[in-house]
Amino acid sequence: MIVCSRCSKDNQDHYKFCLGCGAELPRTSGKPHSLSTDAPPGGSSGSGRAASSPRSRAGQAEAFASAPEMEPGPPPAEADGPEPADEPRWDSLPAELAPLAEQTSPCPHCGAGVPANFRFCHVCGQDLHDEAGSEAPAAAPAERVSAPAVAEAPKPGGTRARLILIQPDGSEGEMFPLSAGPTLIGRSSGGIFANDAYLSPEHAEFRFEGDQLVVKDMESLNGVYIRIEHDVPIELFDGSIFRVGQEILRFDAPSAPEPAADGTQHMGSPHRGYLGRISLLIGRETTGNSYPIPPQGIHLGRERGDVVFPEDGYVSGLHCRIHSEVGHLFLTDIGSSNGTFVRVSNESYVPQGTFVLMGQQLFRAEY
């Protein structure tokens, strides 16, 4: 055995560096202790080179490395006289050390095969714990990622859903978590909402009712909008507000004023054949152009339709239509690229994957 002069740890005679501290070991240490067996496997007994020939650093890497594809090193030069038996192969180790040969890994510095329980490489003295420590963080995320696949249902008050910000180019941006309980969102929430001047300080509240996500407009100035599905009619009521591209419109049901006491009608009263009108909103209580809705309904678009918005690039060529069915008026998106959004009058369900527009930001609800 070789006793380390720095830490006093016992080391095998063939080791060049101490397993305890990595210090270089002296090459002379009293009577050598042979690790060779009486009859090495695969060879005959005696002093033949098959059992005790020295190997260069590269040749030793071949003997200890667990990877079979490593290139063998050059053969050692022939030398006269007896050769020291200080770097035996694993197939010449005593039986009590043989199990370690099956748990080796190549040294990152010299490539030598090192037992799994060694801290320092016995060939070059490399500290293997430093190498393992640098690899541990890379392996940890894999375990954390796989865990949610069997995660239990969220506990009350924990994160249960999230709002994913949709960038102008359609890519996904930041994420805002929604708890199982009520979550208030607005400019005062900070984060991704802090710099949106079109959001009220307390703009909307999200909560769960059973398995359904619900959003409530907290009487915000600019409202909360839900994107409607393609070809799925949504009923319009008196005062319903919807958004097409950058255009915000309000539906007004026909309501003729009562005639004067002498029977005189007010000028500008709705024609009996019309179903109502839509008006552009240019302020909280201010409207711009208005368009009557005839019995056959109207189409809206950028290039085609009864009402066109040629300068709004967010409006599709033919975007949506307003039509009457069984005495009720409906709004239907007819395959627009950017969607048609209806403002939440009080509160509304938000199905999985629904797009929600608040202020100048578009989100997708995931839960």
Image: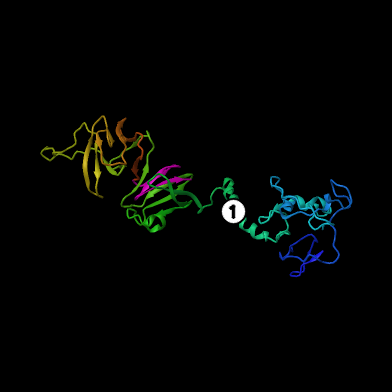
Res 297 quadrant in image: top left
Res 133 quadrant in image: bottom right
Q: Position of residue 12 (x, y in %)?
A: 80, 61
Asked whether 322 or 77 is in front, the reply is: 77
Quarter containing the N terminus: bottom right
In magenta stretch: residue 267: no
User: Which residue corresponds to the image point at 86% horizontal and 64% vertical from the top-left?
Assistant: 31
User: Which secondary structure type mostly characterizes the magenta part of the structure?
Assistant: strand
Q: Position of residue 67 (x, y in %)?
A: 70, 47
Q: Is residue 54 left or right of residue 191?
A: right
User: Which residue corresponds to the image point at 74% horizontal and 69% vertical from the top-left?
Assistant: 7
Q: Position of residue 134 (x, y in %)?
A: 61, 57
Q: Is residue 179 left or right of residue 140?
A: left
In magenta stretch: residue 362: yes
- In the image, residue 118 sits, relative to residue 277, either above or below, namely below
Q: How many marks?
A: 1
SS at badge 1? helix
Q: Is residue 268 left or right of residue 163?
A: left
Residue extent of the magenta highlight: 345-367
Q: Position of residue 270 (x, y in %)?
A: 19, 36
**Which amino acid, by three-letter code, is at mark 1?**
Ala
Asked whether 220 or 99 is in front, the reply is: 99
Q: How is the image coloured?
A: rainbow
Dot 1 surroundings within 10 Å: few (below 14), some, or many (20 or more)?
few
User: Which residue corresponds to the image point at 34% horizontal and 42% vertical from the top-left?
Assistant: 342
Q: Which residue is mark 1?
A: 138
- In the image, residue 133 sits, relative to residue 70, either above or below, namely below
